[in-house]
């Protein structure tokens, strides 16, 4: 990817932000919705259209072109290990930053006491034990505040909250537990159903790996026709991506504008929104940037002994900018594959196996974000988490990042499951919801960069791919 293309995409992003500010100021929201947002939506649709069949063919060709089945076992083991390691690193970073910077405590003591009392009330009604075993409502100094909070809550529960209800319904539908969760996330019972839903990419990958293994075991004469069909389909889909990407700057402009404009109806409201959760946003954003632009290049340098900071980021910029503007690792996958094979020179056999799995299994940005959110929400409600809570949270977030769909706000629903399984109120996602869409752009960049890092490191350890 030439620098000029990267520069054009960057300019389009900036123009998108400037346009969005002007549109909010001059009231062009309707125009933006009717005539600009659709262009961005068309781009996402085109990318998704290509992504699902591309995942299938790239996984099948990736697996089938490995030298032998043992190689697949080694590659699979390394890939999963590397993905677990980067996810845990992200969660660890989230814990260190949130515990040391304490973003939830900026809420102020009185408000924190109110939040705490509301939490105690909710726990009592839901029959859930208090996480730290303390009870502020029993403190005589807070009796009158407790009565106020109780009265407010009684008033609030009279009218239903449609958003919280919708999310809770979604969560209920998705919350399978134990082995059922893994089976439901991984194994399709109908491949055509799985192919019809971009949220089921993991199932498509599962089928692709099985088909690829079967091809490895078939006699060459029998495997060859299907394999050559897959290869030519792969090449055709990559060519389609090439064509779509030529218009990337226009699409990126429309996507950024279409995302920011509906966030507020005046520049003042936009500023207020950003300021209201500033401490949380600052920690989440700082952590995401530190991971993507600090720790990842460091890990890459240590693992490959090649220190090419600017060169690395210039080569993967198209994938990062696509992740930023689409907020979907799945929609970005075709561009990620292209950058990694063409720019980073990772062998297609490795990239085609490692990246599709990574796009749905490895979500370092989402994991870091969820960690910061959960600790922030606990602090905001004056709850002290213990080491055991942090460990449970890390395990739950790792599992949930595997099941999260690689689409905009895909991690949000599963964050409710994590909150609930920790004994916290799932409806608290409503507090961070206003910032979710904006931070989704940044965490998707980290998700995609993490996948690229792992693909590059695995290629290096396999003796493939140098700059
Ligand atoms: N949008 C993210 C992705 O596609 C998932 C999430 O964190 O919501 O990678």
Image (cartoon, grey):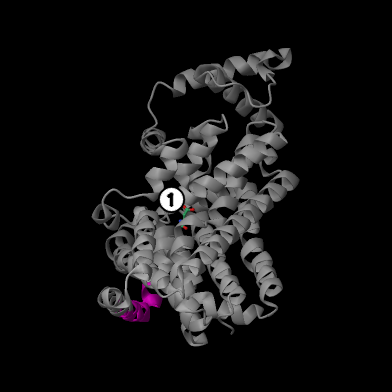
Q: Magenta segment, principal secondary structure? A: helix
- Image location (x, y in percent) of residue 250: 37, 75
Q: Is residue 385 above or below residue 331?
A: above
Look at the numbered disc 1 and say if its residue's Cβ is closer than 8 Å to ligand 1: yes
For the residue pair 126 and 60, the one nearer the viewer reads as: 60
The residue depicted at 52 percent of the width and 46 percent of the height is 399
Which stretch appears magenta? Answer: 235-253
Closer-to-camera residue (309/209): 209
- Relative side of 66 to 446, left or right: left
| 78 relative to 8, above or below | above
For label 1, count other residues whose C-alpha is less than 10 Å away and answer few (under 14), some (14-19) or many (20+). Answer: some
8 w.r.t. 75: above or below: below
Numbered disc 1: secondary structure: helix
Horizontal relation, residue 196 to residue 454: left or right: left
Residue sitting nearer the eye, 269 or 35: 35
Q: Nearer the viewer, residue 295 or 256?
A: 295
Residue 238: within the magenta? yes
Q: Quadrant of the C terminus?
A: bottom right
Query: For residue 328, what is the image quadrant?
Result: bottom left
């Amino acid at each position: 990817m030439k620098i000029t293309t990267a520069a054009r995409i960057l300019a389009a992003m900036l123009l998108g932000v400037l346009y969005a500010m002007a549109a909010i100021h001059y009231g062009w929201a309707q125009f933006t919705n009717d005539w600009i947002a659709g262009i961005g939506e068309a781009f996402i649709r085109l990318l998704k259209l290509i992504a699902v069949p591309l995942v299938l063919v790239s996984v099948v060709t990736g697996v089938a072109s490995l030298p032998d089945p043992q190689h697949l076992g080694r590659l699979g083991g390394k890939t999963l290990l590397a993905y677990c390691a980067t996810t845990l690193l992200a969660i660890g970073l989230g814990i260190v930053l949130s515990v040391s910077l304490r973003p939830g405590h900026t809420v102020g003591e009185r408000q924190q006491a109110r939040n705490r009392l509301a939490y105690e009330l909710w726990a009592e009604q839901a029959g859930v034990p208090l996480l730290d075993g303390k009870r502020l409502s029993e403190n005589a100094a807070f009796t009158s505040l407790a009565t106020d909070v109780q009265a407010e809550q009684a008033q609030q529960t009279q009218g239903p909250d449609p958003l919280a209800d919708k999310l809770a319904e979604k969560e209920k539908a998705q919350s399978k537990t134990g082995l059922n969760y893994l089976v439901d996330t991984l194994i399709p019972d109908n491949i055509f159903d799985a192919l019809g839903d971009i949220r089921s990419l993991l199932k498509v990958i599962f089928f692709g790996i099985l088909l690829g293994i079967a091809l490895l075991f078939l006699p060459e004469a029998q495997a060859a026709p299907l394999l050559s069909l897959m290869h030519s389909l792969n090449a055709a889909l990559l060519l389609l991506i090439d064509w779509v990407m030529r218009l990337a700057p226009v699409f990126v402009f429309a996507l950024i504008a279409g995302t920011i404009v509906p966030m507020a109806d005046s520049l003042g409201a936009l500023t207020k929104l950003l300021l209201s959760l500033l401490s949380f946003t600052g920690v989440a954003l700082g952590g995401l940037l530190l991971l993507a632009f600090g720790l990842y290049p460091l890990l890459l340098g240590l693992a490959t002994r090649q220190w090419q900071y600017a060169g690395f980021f210039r080569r993967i910029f198209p994938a990062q900018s696509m992740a930023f503007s689409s907020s979907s690792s799945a929609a970005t996958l075709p561009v990620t594959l292209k950058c990694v094979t063409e720019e980073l020179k990772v062998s297609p056999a490795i990239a085609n196996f490692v990246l599709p799995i990574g796009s749905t299994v490895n979500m370092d940005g989402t994991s870091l974000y969820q960690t910061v959110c959960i600790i922030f929400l606990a602090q905001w409600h004056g709850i002290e988490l213990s080491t055991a809570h942090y460990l449970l949270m890390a395990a739950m977030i790792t599992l949930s990042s595997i099941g999260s769909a690689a689409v905009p706000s895909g991690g949000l629903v599963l964050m409710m499951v994590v909150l609930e399984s920790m004994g916290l109120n799932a409806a608290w996602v409503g507090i961070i919801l206003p910032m979710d869409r904006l931070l989704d752009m940044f965490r998707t960049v980290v998700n995609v960069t993490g996948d690229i890092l792992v693909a590059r490191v695995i290629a290096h350890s396999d003796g493939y791919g140098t700059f």
